[in-house]
Amino acid sequence: MRQFKLLGVALGAALLVAACGGSDDGGSAPAPAVKFTGLVSFGDSLSDVGSYKVGVVAALGGGTYSVNGIAGAPGASSTPSKNWTELIAAQLSLPAPCPAQTGLNSAAALGGAVAVIDFPGCRNYAQGGARVTDPVGPGSAAAPVNSALGQLTMPIVTQIATHLARVGGSFGGTELVTVMAGGNDALRVLDKLTADATAAGTSAFGNALVSGLVALVPNPANQPAAAAAIGSALQTAAASGASTTSIVTAAVTAASGQPGVTLPINPTAIVAAASTAAATAGTSYAKTTGGPAAVLAMAQAGKELASYIKTQIVGKGAKYVAVVNLPDLSSTPSATSQSADTQGLILNMVIYFNTMLESELAGTPGVRLIDAFGDLRNQVANPTSYGLSNVTIPACNLNAPANGLADPAKPESGTSLVCNASNLKAGDTSRYLFADTVHPTPYGYKLLADLVNKSLVQAGWV
């Protein structure tokens, strides 16, 4: 996941808030402790163990979404960092997870594409940017936002299908299967909301600008022709990708040639009114259409994920499935740096996703739902009880020169994917919660692994 982009409009309180439940075992009775024969993981960047540890990413000493520590890499420590799936594997005395697929579709500016390679013996299918169903996740070459890196973003539904194809169509029943996803769905839903709200505002700005300039034409009989001429000039400038200033200039120039218009035209008041109309239209869209649609889209994603777990994992023979719900993304530095309305929307999106996931999985045998949402909220509210020293600031310097994926002109493009000892912030960051604006530090992953392990013990699985 990358960080959340700031919405350019205010988001109203028209969104409904639903209660989110805690951990559950799907209604099944605790099973006797078992000796797991393997670990199979489906998910996104929070479970990714190195899908993109190739090309420019590997050259920069990165590969996982945290503080990377890979022996021999630039700025690396001697002890490799581990995410929660690796820690769980070690606790269960299972082989270290390896990525089921690696590669990048990077743009030439980032070193170009790196061949996609499948590793049939590896069982960690998680990939940074992966969504539940849609193959176009944040960071993919096809995504409209932050696509230069060219992440593979294989969705969860495809990850599961790939595994089933490798193992003959069914799980053995003695694997521990982990599932954690949804964050990238939230990012893309917010991207769409931002784009749609901006489009509504842009349309309102243009209409108000044309109307204001047409009002300068003294003879009403000439105003329809003036509106057509001014509107055409505005649309031509906009279609060429011109700046707002250039668009306004084109419209004013067209207005200046209309009969009876007093010259020179001072468009300041007209532009101000058009800007107000744009903000009002964007806000209205977010309140009445975009915001509620975003929440419902996340509920649908939660329902789809639950369906895949029931039909394609449990339904295909898995007996031990640990489902980690979506952490409270509104508590991340990415979200807390934004408006209260945006934070509220993100919270509602997560709540609806988790609520639907929980309700759809209720009663499913062999499923253990783990409450990362509640645990992250507790970590942020009570950091010292978790041994945390900082829960608000990223440990990584996301715009450091050594971070080759960071663009100083776009701070949101910085990612912990290439964060290591060479580009950490000064001081002791070992007990920071966040590596970047959304991903945990190695210590944060340890806390998540502890939560998962505790839940597996409570289920009687270990």
Image (cartoon, helix red, strand yellow):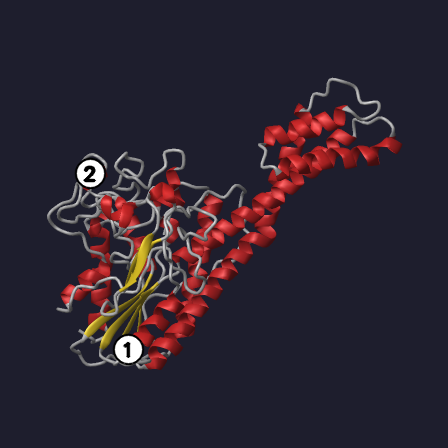
Label 2: element kind: helix
Q: Quadrant of residue 402?
A: top left
> In the rendering, at what x and y percent does residue 21 appear?
38, 66
- Neighbour tally class for label 1: few under 14, some 14-19, many 20 plus, Cα within 10 Å: few
Going by the image, does 439 lie left or right of 273?
Answer: left
Q: Say if residue 19 shows up in the picture.
A: no
> What amino acid is at disc 2?
Ser
Q: Is residue 122 above or below residue 139?
A: below
Going by the image, does 224 lie left or right of 117?
Answer: right
> In the rendering, at what x and y percent does residue 4 appear?
42, 47
Q: Quadrant of the C terminus?
A: bottom left
> In the rendering, at what x and y percent does residue 97 appear?
21, 64
- Neighbour tally class for label 2: few under 14, some 14-19, many 20 plus, Cα within 10 Å: many
Front one among 238 and 351? 238
Front one among 136 and 306? 136
In the picture of the structure, the residue carrying the numbered disc 1 is 167
In the picture of the structure, the residue carrying the numbered disc 2 is 422
Q: Is residue 360 above or below residue 46?
A: below
Q: Quadrant of residue 234?
A: top right
Count of numbered circles in the view = 2
Label 1: element kind: loop
Give the residue drawn at x 35%, y 47%.
112
